[in-house]
Image: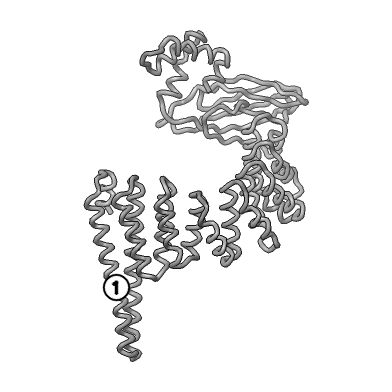
Amino acid sequence: MLRKYVGDEAFYASLNYYLESHKFSSVEIHDLRLAFEKITGEDLNWFFNEWYLNHGKPSLKIDYAWNDSLKKETVTIAQTQNLQKNPLYKIPLLVDIYYEGKVDRKKIVIEKMKEDFSFSLSSQPDLVNVDAEKMLLCTKQDNKTKEEFIFQYYHAPLYLDRYEALMKIGDTYTVGSRDAKLVSDALNDKFWNIRNIAIKNIGALAKEDKQRVQQKLIAMSLVDDNSHVRAAAMKAIAKNYPNDTLAPIFENALNDSSYLVMTTAFKIICDKDVAKGLMLAKQLEGQNDINISTAVATFYAQQGNVENNDFLIATLAKAKGFDKYTLISTYEKYLAKIEDSKAIQAGIAQLVDLGRKGTSRFTRSASVKALGDLTIEFNDRIAKAQKQIEEMRTSGAAADTILIEESKLEKIKRQRDELKASVDDIKKNEKDKRLLKTYQEN
């Protein structure tokens, strides 16, 4: 924002002067301000006070009105932030006015809670683009019409101009309208995130113009140069054409150069065909990428069996940071699903080890939470087993059959008690004060 306000020449000259004047020495924010003031000859206290030393950001409400008899466009801008917590900002802005095939740029300065800015024009403008450089840090309610946003998409020069317009249209368009054409055209935008947003809003067009949109999405899933777009296109294909025989598209994507695309394809296949998903999961276990491993682990947590436990433990062991944090919850769901006591015991041992020795307090906390949830799961199993045994006694079941179930019950109780003891020990020996406080509160 400072660069846009003072201009490139003054901005870089000020930085050069600041760096040369203070090299090999310590500085304060006021040294930077004074450097800019020396080069620009302006008092910039207002800027540094608002944007460096204060907190918060402005919230703007922008309204437009055209007076045809006076040939005057009025832009009303209100600062709506809580002035008890945030300052009233002085905001220099550029406003681009599009009319009669040309663009007229105006400079304005907002200094009041609510201000009117009027511009005399020869005809009603097609668009008034407030903050034409899209440089202001703010939240805003920009009350342009849909027609004006559509004009902005096709005529304003910046990515954020097109982004704002597309977000305004969203998925509320009517097929055959100019809104719908904008969404369709956005599939070919030069910037990947615009294409990505257009794909997410393609639903109505996908139903109405099935063949054309389907072919476009298939092409994007195959050849778009951005992996996020290829993945989004596959999701849109699966969502909008669930009954079409498009499995080869997803299977082909398993060979994509992007792990994001591979995991997206894998999840889609698993949702459609569990048996094929299990077969592919086994093939993907050897992939040396945590994203693939996490996708396989998540699938195993939902659909796998005791044979998958070694892979899950190995994946949890090699994961780092946030991947490990999320995998702990995934693994807990898996352990709550399976019945094999040895596998459960091995899994609990892994979580207990992470709860004690995890390098991150978040990892340790997540492990303790998972162990606590498993304790609840054990309690539920104990209650069900007790009820089943009671029903067996009431129905006159054989004594040896009841004895077998009682033996199983005692084993579950022992596991539950050992688990509770481990959790208590972890909490007792935790050294992080914040985590210790959380444990004590819970």
Coordinates of residue 343 in the picture (x, y in percent): 38, 66
Q: Quadrant of residue 151?
A: top right
State the residue in front, 395 or 139. 395
Compared with 252, 105 (above or below) is above
User: Callout 1: few (<14), some (14-19), or many (20+) C-alpha neighbours within 10 Å?
Assistant: some
Q: Secondary structure at mark 1?
A: helix
Q: Amino acid at mark 1?
A: Lys
Q: Is residue 330 left or right of residue 254?
A: left
Q: Is residue 171 visible?
A: no
State the residue in front, 85 or 226. 226
State the residue in front, 10 or 354. 354
Residue at the spot 53% in from the left edge and 15% down from the top edge = 12
Coordinates of residue 235 in the picture (x, y in percent): 62, 53
Compared with 70, 189 (above or below) is below
Which quarter of the image is occupied by the C terminus? bottom left
Q: Is residue 295 visible?
A: yes
The residue lying furthest to the front in this view is 286
Residue at the spot 52% in from the left edge and 29% down from the top edge = 137
Q: Name the residue beneath numbered marker 1.
A: 411
- In this rendering, the count of numbered labels is 1
Q: Quadrant of residue 94?
A: top right
Residue at the spot 70% in from the left edge and 21% down from the top edge = 104
Coordinates of residue 435 in the picture (x, y in percent): 29, 47
Coordinates of residue 331 in the picture (x, y in percent): 41, 59
**How does the figure colour the protein chain or chains?**
one colour
Compared with 122, 360 (above or below) is below
